[in-house]
Image (tube, rainbow, N blue to C red):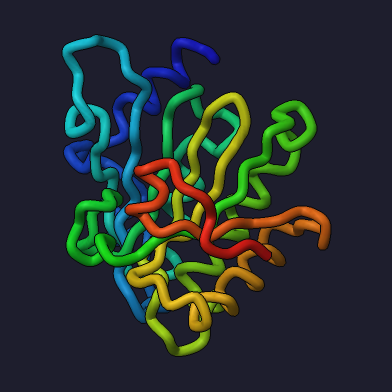
Amino acid sequence: MSEELTKKTEDLSLENDHTVLSSKEEFTAKHPLNTKWTLWFTKPLTSKNENWSDLLKPVISFGSVEEFWGIYNSIPVANQLPVKSDYHLFKEGIKPEWEDEQNAKGGRWQYTFSNRREVLPVINDLWLRGLLAVIGETIEDDENEVNGIVLNIRKGFRVAVWTKDCDLEKLKVIGERFKKVLKLPDDQKIEFMSHDTFNNKGEAQLSL
């Protein structure tokens, strides 16, 4: 990864004054979303003195289709992010942490693309499909269960949709649609785990 790109990801911050949203002449929002969202970024650990709160930072919030595209086109795409970094897109007011009270009773549908070389050419498209399904609310009907979506950059790429509770029957539809969003064949399984189970390294509660 280039030094310039590393600097770009490290500098993702709400404190940056100039974005495509800064000028009314450059940008006019016309299509509001039903929900406002906040993009968060976790930068790779660079010092043993850094903790989670040092690494995880909100980037920017948005509430319209035009704002989303302006932001998406201004940040590094998925396959350009450094290893051990993350993108998190969550409803405004919800932190991408399982301890957040709106996440605490929920869990996540997740899938890991372990073959990095194979998925590298398509991960940008799959991540974008996930973002659009979440902010467009097509990944669910009227349940209002989805709190956010996360992309973890490790040896492979893990994509996860976070939910506010663990009603498996209610969440099954979300899992089925998430699998289609990721273009997974029938023999590839996605798993649902409660945050408690995930953090205790237990078994998945449901797979599709």
Q: At 23% from the left edge and 10% from the top edge, which residue is drawn?
A: 48
Q: Quadrant of residue 185?
A: bottom right
Q: At 42% from the left edge and 18% from the top edge, which residue is drawn?
A: 6
Q: Nearer the viewer, residue 193 or 12?
A: 193
Q: Quadrant of residue 156?
A: top right
In what quadrant of the picture does the N terminus appear? top right
Residue ranking furthest to the bottom: 142
In the shown orientation, is residue 99 left or right of residue 46?
left
Q: At 37% from the left edge and 22% from the top edge, which residue is drawn?
A: 44
Q: Position of residue 35 (x, y in %)?
A: 33, 75
Q: Is residue 70 visible?
A: yes
Q: Position of residue 89 (x, y in %)?
A: 39, 54
In the shown orientation, is residue 160 left or right of residue 87?
right
Q: Is residue 23 visible?
A: no
Q: Position of residue 140 (x, y in %)?
A: 52, 80
Where 12 sits versus 103, above or below? above
Q: Nearer the viewer, residue 167 or 185?
A: 167
In the shown orientation, is residue 175 left or right of residue 194?
right
Q: Nearer the viewer, residue 36 or 196?
A: 196
Where 174 sits versus 142, above or below? above
In what quadrant of the picture does the C terminus appear? bottom right
Q: Position of residue 175 (x, y in %)?
A: 59, 69
The mark total stands at: 0
Q: Nearer the viewer, residue 200 or 6?
A: 200
Q: At 23% from the left edge and 31% from the top edge, which residue is drawn?
A: 52
